[in-house]
Structures are given as C-alpha cells and as structure tokens.
Image (cartoon, coloured by chain):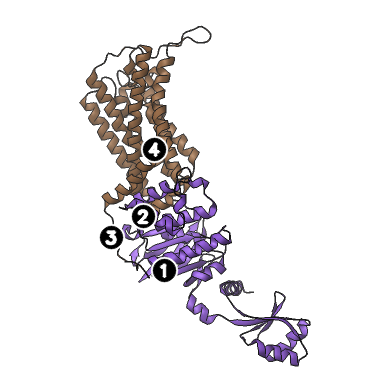
Chain colours: A purple, B brown
Amino acid sequence: MNAIEIRNLSKSFRGMYAVDNLNMTVPVGAIYGFIGENGSGKSTTEKLICGHLVPDKGKIKLFGRDYKDAGVRVRVGALIENAGCFPNSSVWDNLMMQAINLGLKNRDEEIRRVLEIVRMEDSAQIKFKSCSLGMKQRIGIAMALLGDPALLILDEPINGLDTDGMRIMREILVDITQKYGCTVLISSHILGELEKIATHYGIIRQGKMICEISAQEMENRARVFVSLKTKDMQGAKDALQRKFANVREEDGYLRVYDVNNTESIVEYLLKNGHVVNEIKKNKIGLEEYYIELMSKKEGK
Amino acid sequence: MENVHKLKFESPSFIQRLKGMLGVDFYRLFHTPMFYIFLAIAAFIPALILSTTGMENPDGTMSPQLYTNVWNAIAANTPLYTFNSIGEYANMNMVFIFGGIMVSIFIGHDYKSGYVKQLFTTHAKKQDYMMSKSITCAFAMACMCITYLLGAVVSGLLVGLDFSVNVGSLLIAILSKMIMSLGWASLYTFLNVIFRRYFGVSIASSFFFGTGIPIIAIGMIFGNAAGSVLNIFLYGSSVYACLSSNIVTLLVCLVVSVAWALIYNVLGTILLSKSDVY
C-alpha cells in the first residue's frame, strides 16, 4: 500500500495549469522529497492532497482510500506555507485548539509531547506573533504532529532558517519518522538538506512529475568524478581527453567523470608534464542530479 | 522504529466531528477579547440610546424622546417593517447588525491566520465548518441579546423610564430574537464563506443585510400589509418578535430561523465543496 497515490491530477487557475496530469507514488514510511523550482506546482499539489483546492480532474488516494475520506484525513498533519496559527494566541492555546479539533483525549499530555519533539517545552506561553521564524516553523510541525498523524505534508519547512535552525529541523524530522513511523512528504529548495533525510524523491516541473526515484536508486546511479586544478588547464584537459572519455572544465576545475582513482590521474598527468595543484574525489549529489535533469528537459 | 504506526483509519462519526469543530470555535470565542468586546458593545447600545434620548443639545434645544417605555428599546409595540422614527428601528435587532460584524471578524481571522487550513486538512466534510460557525456565532449573538437586555434595563432605571409591559409577550419577544440568532449567524457565515478572500467586503455585506435594508425597502413599497410575507425572511421575523408577541410569534421565529439556517448551511457546504477553500 502507498501512503499517497496520485493519478492524472490536474489543476488550473484561469486556464493555466499549475498541476498537469501529475502522477505520484509515495510509499508508506517514506520521507519523500518533493523538488521543483518556484511555481512548478509543489504547493498546489500539496494543497490538493490536503483538500484545500478542488482538482479539475484526477484521483488522489491516501493509504488506499479516497482523499476525502474523513477517517484518513483526520490522520493527516500539514504545514503548508505557514503554521496557520492565531497570532494573538499563545503557542499553548494554538496547540490546544488543534488538539480539541482532533478530538484528542489527553490534550495537555499530547501538547507537552509535541512541544518536546520540536524542542519548545519552555515557549508554550509565548504569543505566536512573538515567535521567531524558526520557532513558528517548529510550532507548525508541532501542530501537524498532534493526534498520531500517519502522513505529514510539509511545505518548505526549512526555508528562511539559519544553519542552526536547519539542523534542529533536520533532527526533528528524522526523529519523528524514526520514532513515530510517519510518512513524510516534504518540499524544499534546499536540496543539500533534503538529501540528508529523504528516502525518495519526486521532481516536478511545470506541473508535471518528471522523475520519481528512491534515494537508493539515486545512490546507485550517482556518478563519481575527480576534480582537479593544474597550472595549464587547457593542456591538462587535452591530455586527459586522450585517455578518459568524459572530461569537462566546470567551475574553474577540470572534471574527469566516472573515475575515482586520483592516483592514476596524478601519475598520468605527471607523465604528460602537468603538475596537479589540487585534486579531490566527488560524487554527483541531488543538486547536480536535479540540475542535470532540468538541463536535459530544457534541451541544453 | 520505536513506535511503528498502526495504519488503522476509523472514520469519526458526525457527532465526533462536529464536537471537535465546535470545541475549537468555543475555545477561541472564550479565549479572545473580541467576544467580550462585542458583549460590552451590545450592552452599550441601549445605554447610549436611552441616556442620550431627551437630553439637552448644546444649542439649548431638546433631542427628541425616542422612548417613554424602556421595553421599546427591546422591541416595537407592533411589528413595524417600515419605521417613521429611529426609535421604532433602534431596538434589540441592532444586535444582529453588530453580530454580523463580529461573525465577519471571527471567520475572517480563520482565513487571515491560515488556521482554516488546519481545519480543512483534518475535516474533509465542509458541513462541519458551516454548522460549527453557525452554532458558535448564534450562541455569541444570543449572549449579546442578553447583555443588550441588561444594558437597557440598567440605563432605563437610571433615566427613569416606564417599565410597564406584558411580561409574557416581552419574554417571548426576547426569546424569539435570541432564536433568530441562529438564522442570522448562518446568513453571516454563508456571506463570509462567499467573500472569504475579501475581509472588507465580508464586513460590508454582513452590515448591509443586518440592517434589513432589503426588507425595509419591500415594506416601504407594499406597506406593513406585506408583513405576513415578510415574516418568512430573517429581518421580517426579527421585527415580528415585538411587545405584542404570542406563542405563534415564537413558533414563526423558530421555523424561519431553523429553515434559513438549514438553507445557508447547505448552500455554504456546496460552495466550500465545489471551490478552493484557501
């Protein structure tokens, strides 16, 4: 069974398709990184899943049930765009309202539990409007975590956070998936951060899903390369191209793809009269994969 | 995993869903100053009218006496769909005008804060939202009717107005107006759902309908003879609840209020189900 299964989903605004025949499969227990540039349709898709928008066509199933099923929707937690809290109410009051909304029994205990998860035990009485951006994002996650959610939908939860805020958020997300086993759909622009936690990826472009891949597949497909610098870059490039199939000059470095033996390269260049000033092994990460995929789609 | 998720999905019953939504709305109502401010406003309206009526103006003239009997601040002696003086208009029905503004602020904040996203994520059935808002706001308006009554009595005592009345008719009139709160609250909830993206328009539309201008206009064209027809509308029934009310008045108000509440709830539910909510 999949946590989310979307087939041929479309949504248009004034004739423009924000989501266009989108298909998506999120396995149960996955941390699904939902990637795409601004305006690619990520938030629209998330809003459609949460029932905030009405689709033009297509089917959305959550845990094998129609997404309008009250039983499944009560187990969905979401943080889309902002935490959705009343600014003049305290953090505690906002969480209390959500706990009441979900019909939770041990409300005080539940609120303390989620506040502990998001590391905000001491901030319960602060008014929401007085919280920092990082705190607000964490409160949004705490709201989404109330009531044993089976699915968490988080839209750009790490946007605008400082390094420490991002680290805390990452720890929280790993914590909740490992301890509570939620399926998490998380969209983000910060691919480096996403790469550290996601088990699956979905890449969306102009409302269409262009690629769905698991982190394991990505790992298997990931290309290794060696990047280096020499005094005579052009000469070294010509020499390397005689021996290696894929040599490119990128970002001020010479990159030799699908090779991870630095010693053989250094030795080869020395034989050809080139002294290597700097050399390192690399692996194509999510960011490079994403850029490469987008370039292919744009026909570059 | 320490706590592997149980993927069991039990659909909450209608009562459970409504209880959850009502719980949130009442919690919010009692935990925000807005409700208490509007209760105070409701008490202040009759106090303002009664304390200024018959007062000496700065130019030495006397302002016209609106009421001689304090209960006219609650309702007119007979159903008056049109009026000749502001005194015939300014009674407990004014609670519904201010109540409309309160409902607009209450629902507007749902959208402004984004909290409505939490509600619609966990509540797939849009009728939960409509019913909960209608009931909560009807309760708030009924409370405003009570503070309005208290304000009228206290200021009537201070000004020294006549208190003679048919107690039975008075009680029926007050109870009928409180019952009408449900219909009015449903109308305002519906209007606020229509104009959910335009806070100012929500308030203006609630104010417009709350004043009863459309019904007053019909009354002016056809006269008070059109009363029995006008009673099928919220403003008409609210006017019908007067100081000569009897048990029929109560029944009419009950039927009209519940019928309109049902109509607006159904329309609001359809609208929310067929359109983007946020």
Q: Residue furthest left?
A: B247
- Camera-nearest residue between A65 and A33: A33
Question: Badge 1 is on which residue?
Answer: A178
Q: Chain of mark 1?
A: A
The chain ID associated with circle 2 is: A
Mark 1, Cα crowd under 10 Å, few <14 / some 14-19 / many 20+, is some
Seen in the image, is A224 located left or right of residue A236? left
Q: CA distance from mark 1 to mark 4?
A: 46 Å
Q: Report the residue that reaches farthest toward the bottom.
A: A271
The residue tagged with tag 1: helix, strand or loop?
helix
**Amino acid at pointer 1:** Gln
Image quadrant in which you'd find residue B252: top left
Circle nearer the N terminus (2, 1) = 2
Q: Are marks 3 and 4 in contact (CB under 8 Å)?
A: no
Q: Compared to A75, does B78 lie above or below?
A: above
Between the residue at mark 4 and the residue at mark 2, the CA separation in whole angstroms equals 35 Å
Report whether mark 3 lies on the same chain as mark 2: no
The span from disc 3 to disc 4 (Cα, nearest Å) is 33 Å
Along the viewing direction, whichever of B262 and B46 lies nearer the viewer: B46
In the rendered image, the residue lying farthest to the front is A122
Residue ID at (27%, 28%): B175
Residue type highlighted by circle 4: Tyr
Crowding near the residue tagged with mark 4, few <14, some 14–19, many ≥20 C-alpha atoms within 10 Å: many
The CA distance from mark 3 to mark 2 is 20 Å
Q: Nearer the viewer, mark 1 or mark 3?
A: 1
Local crowd at mark 3 within 10 Å, few (<14), some, or many (≥20)?
few
Contact between marks 4 and 2 (CB within 8 A): the answer is no
Q: Which residue is mark 2?
A: A110
